[in-house]
Amino acid sequence: MTQWVENPAGGRERGPRAIVRAWFEAIVRPRRFFPVGVAPGDQAPGLVFAMGVTLVASLLRFALAGETIFATGYPTLGGRRALSVVLVLAVIVVLVAPLVLHLVAAVQTLLLVAFAPGRAGVSETVQVIGYATAPCVFVGLPSPIVVVFATGYGAVLLAIGIAEIHAVSIARAAALSAIPATIVFGIGYGGFEAFETLLRTWGTV
């Protein structure tokens, strides 16, 4: 295991390099990453991580959709589309992402209260949800199957993180994280919409 997360409580490495390392570890070795990458009372890195994931996904969406994205409901301010993109990104990344993350963490904490007697704190839950969003950097790609895979893997990472940090079995963690995963990955990152698109493409709905 790399040195950067061996002692998270003692002060974890910050900055873009640390975020990239956390992304790789969360994706590739989640069962090793969560116990050492999540620190008690230090939710800032997990929050920044989730904001970064949302930023990358949003930038990909805007970059690849081009002019057509404004026909799908994104606002245009006075005809200034570049300014509109900046403002929309700012709202999504700076306001919406942290708000949703904390609301979902509150829901997850309530679910853990009754069924995880050895649970960790709210701060750790915020971090787990934040780091579980790692695969969602790819949801900005115009491919429903990629979005379904990314959001599905995010839900898996959330269950693994809950199991590792809150000392419950993976089966119980999957059940306890089902509602938060639905909110974050199914609705927030568009997993349900992408899955419905796939079903229509395959002619099953």
Image: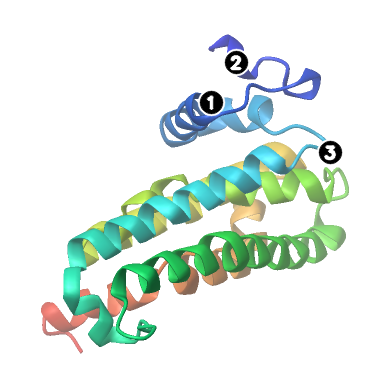
96 or 201, nearer to the observer: 96
Mark 1 burial class by Cα count in 10 Å: few <14, some 14-19, many 20+: some
Q: Residue at x 64, y 42 (%)?
A: 46
- Percent position of residue 57, x then y: 37, 56
In the rendered structure, which amino acid carries the disc numbered 1?
Ala
In the picture, which quadrant includes the C terminus? bottom left
Front tag of 1 and 2: 1
Say whether disc 1 or disc 3 marks the residue closer to the N-terminus: 1
Give the vertical position of 183 relative to 109 (above or below).
below
Tag 3, which secondary structure? loop
Q: Quadrant of residue 69?
A: bottom left
The answer to whether residue 82 is left or right of residue 156 is left
Separation of residues labelled 1 and 2 (CA atoms): 8 Å
In the picture, which quadrant includes the N terminus? top right
Say whether disc 2 or disc 3 marks the residue closer to the N-terminus: 2
Q: Which mark is residue 18?
A: 1
Q: Which mark is residue 41?
A: 3
**Label 2, on which residue?**
4
Q: Are marks 2 and 3 in contact (CB under 8 Å)?
A: no
Mark 3 burial class by Cα count in 10 Å: few <14, some 14-19, many 20+: few
Tag 1, which secondary structure? helix
- Percent position of residue 162, x then y: 66, 47
Tag 2, which secondary structure? helix
- Percent position of residue 58, x then y: 37, 60
Q: Are marks 1 and 2 in contact (CB under 8 Å)?
A: yes
Give the vertical position of 144 relative to 31 (above or below).
below
Q: Residue at x 62, y 62 (%)?
A: 175
Is residue 159 visible from the viewing direction of this image?
A: no
Is residue 166 visible from the viewing direction of this image?
A: yes
In the rendered structure, which amino acid carries the disc numbered 3?
Gly
Separation of residues labelled 1 and 3 (CA atoms): 18 Å
In the rendered structure, which amino acid carries the disc numbered 2?
Trp
